[in-house]
Amino acid sequence: MHPSAEWREEMEAQQVENAFHPYNNEGQYHLAKVFASPKIHPEATIHLACVDGRNKFLLPDTAFSSHADFIGRLDQMAKCYCPWKEREIKPRAGQESGEWYTSVRYWAKDSLAVLQEILDNPELKGKCVWAPAKEFNSEGERVYTDMHTGDWWMNIQVSCQDYGYPLNRQAKVSVGGASSKTVIPIILSSDKTQLGSLSGDASAWPLYMSIGNVIGSERFRKENHAMRLIGLLPTLTGTALIGKMVLIQVACAQILRHRRRIRTGKEVSSTM
């Protein structure tokens, strides 16, 4: 179950009557989208352009009552997403003094919940593939483009049959289908980044997650939100390179580790 399942259910119930809830109408939704994406505009700009009585060009029932009203509606939407939780990697017994291993605190999200958010994302409709395929050029030569055209996905799709998963090898399948399932390859990426001008020289290692089902040309488009931030790891100073690599690997393993029951009734240590 998604950590914010109650908020998501309440939001969906409200959107039955108003598809743009928590906004009043489509116009207010698009106004918020302009001034909140890809980043929120300064308070003064929002006050002049979006607050009732300040912009005479706004359509009726489109303006916000105040800047706090503008931010509050964004917060209502944010509650439907997986929250951040602080985690810690502690040194193993006898390694407290070793320079390659130290206690580290970092922030992470539930990776299965984030996966659910990616699959629920309406912006990805028509931009995903749900079954492997072999592609050939005009001369009959095998062509490799996206992940689903490789041999790995095809082999996994077939080998999972041995574990009780009725996977459909050839036909395209839909998420949540009653009679067929498919492979969801997980893609992780990370790169050192500065935290911002107000943080001085502080930096961190953000960990992003996406799925291989998203077409490669669409995966990194910011409007698709196919790459999700699921972890924020601190950079380590005074630690050997091998220690940094081990800590990052341990943190990734913690983020992706889950215990879930599958339809066969078997409990597995990880479904990802």
Image (cartoon, rainbow, N blue to C red):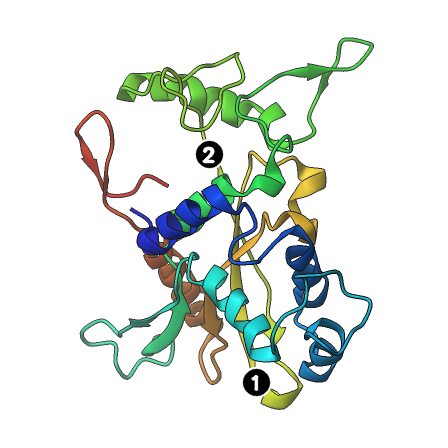
The image position of residue 192, as x and y in percent, is: 59, 70
Instruction: Kindly check if marks 1 and 2 are in contact, taking CB atoms under 8 A apart as contact.
Output: no
Q: Which mark is residue 85?
A: none
The residue identified by callout 2 is: 184
The residue identified by callout 1 is: 202
The image position of residue 178, as x and y in percent, is: 36, 19
Question: In screen coordinates, is 55 left or right of 119?
Answer: right
Identify which amino acid the numbered label 1 is placed on. Answer: Ala
Q: CA distance from mark 1 to mark 2?
A: 35 Å
Which of 189/120 is in front?
120
Which of 259/20 is in front?
20
Q: Quadrant of the C terminus?
A: top left
Res. 230 in view: no
Res. 13 in view: yes
Which residue occupies 65% across, 31% down?
A: 146
How many marks can you see? 2
